[in-house]
Each structure stands twice: as C-alpha cells, then as structure tokens.
Amino acid sequence: MAGPTRDFWQARFDAQQTPWDRGGPSPQLLAWQARGEAPAAGSRVVVPGCGSGWELATLAAQGCEVIGLDYAEAAVQRSRALLQGRGLAARVEQADVLEWAPAQPLDAVYEQTCLCALHPDAWVAYAQQLHRWLRPDGRLYALFMQALRPNAATGAIEGPPYHCDIHAMRALFPEPQWLWPKPPYEQQPHPMGHTELALVLLRR
C-alpha cells in the first residue's frame, strides 16, 4: 500500500522527530471538555494514531474507557509510560487501524492525527472502519488537517500530513451515514504551521 510504513513512524519516534507533538493535549479537546461536549465519563472511546498519549491521558482522567492504537511500538511505549506516570488506566495497542476491530461497538472515536497520516489511497477503507467501530448515534470527534501544498494544483499528493480538504471529507463521511454540523467549523493552529478544522460527526 502507498504511504508511510510502520518503520517510517518507528524511526521518527526513535529519533525524537515528532514535530506534530504539542507536548500536551489538543486545545480543541480541552475546549470540547470545557463546554461539556467531549465524551462523558464511562464512554468507550478509541484514539487511533495515539502517538505520545496526551489525548489518551486527558480522556482517561475524564473517566472514559479509552483504547489507544498506534502503528509504532515506540509510540505505544510512550503512551503507556505517560499513563503509568499519571496513575491512569487505558488500553494501548500496537495495531493497524485498517485491520483492528473493537470487541463491542464504541461510543466515540477521537480522530486527530491518524487520517492525515494515512496515504489517501487508504482513506475509504479507514472511513469504513470508523463507521463499523461506532454504535448508532456514536460520535466521531474529528480534526481535519488543512495542509494544502502548492504542488496540489498539478495533482501531486504530498505528505504526511496529507491535506484533508473539507469537500473530500464530506465525500469520505457522507450523508446519510453521518450527520454533519453546519459550518463554519472551529479552527485550531497546528505546531507544524497548518490548521485543523474541528467538528463532531454523528454516526447514523
């Protein structure tokens, strides 16, 4: 399959080359929590592409039953160390998100870094996975990376992170499978100089 391999991500974590890492949870997750819009205590939540585990720890501290997934063993170890250091409980698995399946339908998916890290050739399969993972009326907390590059005008596909054009996202997560909120959507600056569009989709 096209795109970054497991070894690609492992090498970046091993070399401490993780410029996407904020050193803490996303401000958007904290904003959702402050407004009472984040997954509630007791919710079963998965965080694909959990990286260093900041969002895992934040959701676990909220009282959620959290599962973290990552391609790279180094990321899994980072997440586990963070959770252990804070005395928090969450399950962290080294897994391919295109193959993983939960034991039972989940209440929420927190999608921040996984989609934009996958080559677009894998996006349809990944979107289908998210729909399968969630129960009806489950929520997809999405931050869609806006990383448009000059060569996009010639058809070039460059990344990671790959540009998650909002029109492409509507095709990827279509009505009536998903209920979309009305725009405009909140924007979050990204450490790599990009922007994320933040919204919550309801799984039909």
Image (tube, rainbow, N blue to C red):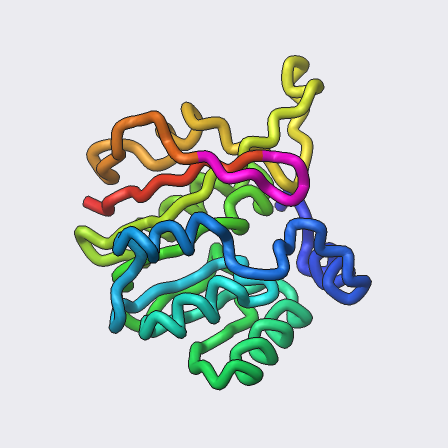
Can residue 132 be seen here? Answer: no
Image coords of residue 80 (percent x, y): 56, 78
Percent position of residue 169, x then y: 41, 32
Using the image, determine if residue 92 lies above or below residue 179: below
Q: Is residue 72 magenta?
A: no
Instruction: Say which of 170 and 41 sits in front.
Output: 41
Residue 115 % position (x, y): 51, 45
Give the magenta range: 187-194
**Which percent across, then down, holds residue 56?**
47, 67
Q: Quadrant of residue 7?
A: bottom right
Which residue sits at x=56%, y=64%?
A: 70
Q: Residue at (50%, 53%) from the top-left corner?
A: 26
Residue 106 lies left or right of residue 151; in this view the side is: left
On screen, residue 108 versus residue 26, left or right, reads: left
Residue 74, by quadrant, is bottom right
Q: Horizontal placement of 79 versus 63: left or right? A: right
Q: Residue furthest front?
A: 34
Above or below, 198 against 106 in this view is above
Say which of 2 and 171 sits in front.
171
**Picture residue at 41% right of the left edge, 55% below the top:** 30
| Residue ID at (32%, 74%) | 63
Relative placement, left or right, of 98 versus 35 is right
Magenta residues, dominant SS class = loop
Residue situated furthest top in the rendering: 153
